[in-house]
């Protein structure tokens, strides 16, 4: 409650920043409606006054004036309400866009490691979902409170002038409604926070059941029943919780409503008694009754608006605390020393742990990459190769030790500039549902150079099949949208390689770049690697030892540590882990001939 005024200002500022003109128009319309409603009360009272004089012999013409006034006020209120409701749709979209843009800015700027944290995903989801509706709910709530207060002031003034006692009575009758509304908002907020993680799990299952990437496997393994049951079980838990919430809110609402009805009833009974003993005239009593109806309507509106202000304030705090990190994140991204041309990249006694594991996945790892070299990281699955590559690319920071660019720790360098100097193609590179052209251009989207892009595709042996697509490079890759088509995994891998060529960065990190290529293309790629990446520095990651034998230096990773390193010949001579695994893998390719035993 103490933070409420501050959050209200924040909410209004969010709406104002997104759409000042629309917000001003909306506020103006609300104000006009409020004025029109006050006009209705006053015109109504005058109409009643005049109507009673008609009975005393006045001509019927005396009611025309107030009648016209009443109709005009009603017409203005009705028209402005329609305009406001429709105009609000546009306002809602503008506010949503502005808020979600800020959420995207944060999610793009946070450290990669944040994406391994469930707490971050909860916060992200809450900010994302609330960004769409809450600022506007707050804006509307505040405007609603203002307009309700405004009309209330008008009606109350009328009522105070006629009979102040009733004004007090009705006000008191609404205290329980107010209390119930704020309490219900608090309960709803707590409920929604508690649901986030489970809702995310449920949403994930729903996506698996409806996405193209999983569709084949879901069918092949007949998974839909299994996944649906899991999904439905999570939904059932939510429904059970919603029932509890609804019951508790219903109970609060009913108690509050009952008290209000009793108090309102008492006020009406009092009014009738006053009329019967002549304390109050019939015209005044009629006006009081009319005002009471309007007043309780406005008080209802006030309670609802105040409730939505309160409820949205709780959610807006989530949103603002999420986007509050943005300036710091942007400052950090742009700070640090300039990045000189690469001479060496070194991991110096690096240890690294993922947040979800207590055991480090890299322990005291030292590797060195010199400008112009092809360096290989080899090791079995899970030995830490990809993690090390991400550390070398500055995507993660070591828990211990340093990664140094020309001897300067990466943490002291401008992070954006470091990334600019690195091209990294992950093993699970992204297949964007964009055109073939864009799928390569994302390597360096700001470089608008179709000729270079075509050349990159040629170097990756992708040009022939991309050019042959129905719309050539403009063909959409992905079949969820109209005019799209699909590539084979091997063809996708060549697109990813083209992406790396097009990036044209001084340092290239290729994580299993040929895993999906046929053996001939793979052999060709590694034979030509020096020619393909002339003058560039290449860090090659592979679990296939045969592919890296031409590298200048080979590091063998085992259980997150460097087991040994050297050139292929040196490592073979040592007859250690490398030689053992190299020969083991080579043996897999050589079938013993029919006379092998002889
Ligand atoms: P490699 O590339 O050699 O196959 P990785 O670097 O991908 O190995 O993984 C090394 C170890 O770290 C594995 O045991 C893997 O399970 C674990 N790991 C990888 N990514 C994460 C992550 N995001 N969170 C927790 N553990 C991870």
Image (cartoon, rainbow, N blue to C red):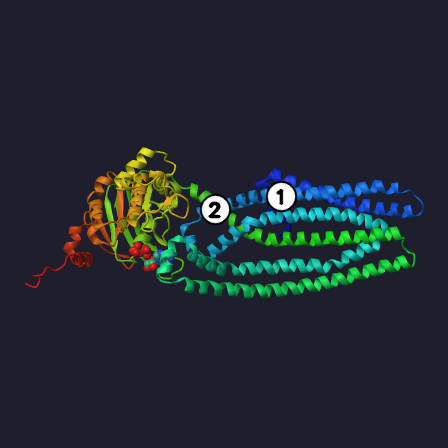
Q: Nearer the viewer, residue 453 or 316?
A: 453
Say whether residue 414 is visible: no
Within 10 Å of the Cα at label 2, are there few (<14), some (14-19), or many (20+) other Cα atoms? few
Viewport quadrant of the N terminus: bottom right
Residue 355, position as x, y percentages in the image: 40, 58
- Return the mark for residue 451: none
Contact between labelled residues 2 and 1, with CB atoms less than 8 Å apart: no
- Picture residue at 39% right of the left edge, 36% below the top: 446
Residue at mark 2: 104
Residue 559, position as x, y percentages in the image: 28, 60
Quarter-of-image position of residue 168: bottom right
Viewport quadrant of the C terminus: bottom left
Q: Is residue 204 left or right of residue 146?
A: left
Q: Say above or below: 359 vs 15.
A: below
Which of the two labelled residues, at mark 1 and mark 2, occupies the earlier sequence position? 1
- Picture residue at 82% right of the left edge, 54% below the top: 289
Residue 585, position as x, y percentages in the image: 19, 57
**Front: mark 1 or 2:** 1
Q: Nearer the viewer, residue 453 or 164?
A: 453
- Picture residue at 80% right of the left edge, 40% below the top: 68
Residue 387, position as x, y percentages in the image: 33, 53
Q: Secondary structure at mark 1?
A: helix
- Return the mark for residue 86: 1
Q: Residues under labels 1 and 2: Cα distance?
A: 28 Å
């Amino acid at each position: 409650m103490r933070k409420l005024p501050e959050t209200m200002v924040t909410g209004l500022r969010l709406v104002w920043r997104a759409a000042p003109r629309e917000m001003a128009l909306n506020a103006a319309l609300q104000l006009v409606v409020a004025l029109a409603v006050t006009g209705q009360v006053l015109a109504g009272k005058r109409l009643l006054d005049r109507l009673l004089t008609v009975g005393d012999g006045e001509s019927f013409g005396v009611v025309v004036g107030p009648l016209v006034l009443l109709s005009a006020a009603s017409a203005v209120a009705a028209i402005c309400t329609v305009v406001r409701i429709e105009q609000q749709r546009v306002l809602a979209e503008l506010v949503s866009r502005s808020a979600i843009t800020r959420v995207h800015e944060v999610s793009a700027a946070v450290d990669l490691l944040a994406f391994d944290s469930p707490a971050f995903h909860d916060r992200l989801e809450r900010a994302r979902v609330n960004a769409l509706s809450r600022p506007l709910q707050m804006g509307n709530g505040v405007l609603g409170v203002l307009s309700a207060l405004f009309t209330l002031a008008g009606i109350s003034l009328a009522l105070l002038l006629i009979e102040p006692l009733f004004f007090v009575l009705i006000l008191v009758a609404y205290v329980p409604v107010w209390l119930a509304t704020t309490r219900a908002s608090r309960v709803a907020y707590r409920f929604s926070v508690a649901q986030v993680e489970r809702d995310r799990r449920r949403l994930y299952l729903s996506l698996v059941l409806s996405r193209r990437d999983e569709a084949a496997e879901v069918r092949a393994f007949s998974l839909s029943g299994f996944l649906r049951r899991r999904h439905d079980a999570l939904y059932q838990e939510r429904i059970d919780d919603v029932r509890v919430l609804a019951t508790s809110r219903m109970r609060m609402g009913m108690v509050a409503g009952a008290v209000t009805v009793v108090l309102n009833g008492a006020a009406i009974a009092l009014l009738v008694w006053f009329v019967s003993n002549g304390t109050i005239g019939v015209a005044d009593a009629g006006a009081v009754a009319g005002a009471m109806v309007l007043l309780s309507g406005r008080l209802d509106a006030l309670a609802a608006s105040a409730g939505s202000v309160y409820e949205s304030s709780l959610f807006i705090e989530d949103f603002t605390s999420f986007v509050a990190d943005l300036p710091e994140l942007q400052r950090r991204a742009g700070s640090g020393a300039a990045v000189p041309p690469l001479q060496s990249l070194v991991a110096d006694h690096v240890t690294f742990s993922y947040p979800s594991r207590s055991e480090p996945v890299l322990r005291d790892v030292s590797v060195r990459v010199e400008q112009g070299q092809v360096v290989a990281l080899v090791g079995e699955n899970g030995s830490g190769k990809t993690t090390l590559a991400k550390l070398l690319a500055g995507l993660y920071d070591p828990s211990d030790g340093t990664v140094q660019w020309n001897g300067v720790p990466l943490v002291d360098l401008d992070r954006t500039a470091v990334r600019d100097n690195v091209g990294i193609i992950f093993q699970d590179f992204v297949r964007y549902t964009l055109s073939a052209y864009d799928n390569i251009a994302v390597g360096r989207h700001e470089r608008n150079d179709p000729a270079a892009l075509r050349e990159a595709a040629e170097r990756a042996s992708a040009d022939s099949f991309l050019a042959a697509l129905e719309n050539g490079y403009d063909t959409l890759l992905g079949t969820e949208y109209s005019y799209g088509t699909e590539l084979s995994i091997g063809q996708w891998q060549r697109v990813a390689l083209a992406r790396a060529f097009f990036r044209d960065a001084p340092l290239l990190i290729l994580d299993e770049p040929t895993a999906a290529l046929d053996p001939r293309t793979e052999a060709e790629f590694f034979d030509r690697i020096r020619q393909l990446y002339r003058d560039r520095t290449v860090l090659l990651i592979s679990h296939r030892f045969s592919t890296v034998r031409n590298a200048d230096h080979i590091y063998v990773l085992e259980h997150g540590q460097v087991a040994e390193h050297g050139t292929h010949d040196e490592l073979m001579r040592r007859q250690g882990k490398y030689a053992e695994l190299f020969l083991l893998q080579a043996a897999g390719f050589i079938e013993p001939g029919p006379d092998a035993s002889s």
